[in-house]
Amino acid sequence: MNALTDLQAAVAAENTVIAGAVVLLNGIAARLAAAGTDPAALAALTADITANSDALAAAVATVPPAP
């Protein structure tokens, strides 16, 4: 692959990751509203958000620095 093709592939991959993060973040508000004040639902949501945050942080940490 040439440099332009490599860059295009990297941008496409980044756009996919960003779109996934946006879906995740937008879904948090809806899930909080659906959980209401149910302690069990809120605890499950908290655990899920923590796991997703950890996965996102790990993914961001693996991105190599710009040259």
Image (spheres, rainbow, N blue to C red):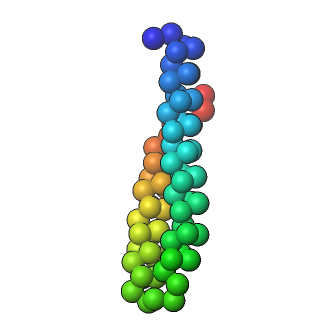
Image x and y of residue 50, in percent = 45, 69
Residue 60 in view (yes/no): no
Residue at 46 percent of width and 44 percent of height? 62
Residue at 60 percent of width and 32 percent of height? 66
Residue 24 in view (yes/no): yes
Q: Which quadrant holds residue 48?
A: bottom left
Q: How many marks?
A: 0
Left or right: 44 as drawn, with respect to 9: left
Q: Is residue 12 above or below residue 60?
A: above
Q: Is residue 37 above or below residue 58?
A: below
Image x and y of residue 3, in percent = 54, 13
Quadrant including the C terminus: top right
Residue at far top of view: 2
Q: Is residue 12 above or below residue 50?
A: above
In front here: 66 or 54? 54
Residue at 53 percent of width and 30 percent of height? 12
Image x and y of residue 37, in percent = 51, 89
Left or right: 54 as drawn, with respect to 28: left
Q: Is residue 6 above or below residue 10?
A: above
Residue at 52 percent of width and 84 percent of height? 36
Quadrant including the N terminus: top left
Image x and y of residue 32, in percent = 54, 76
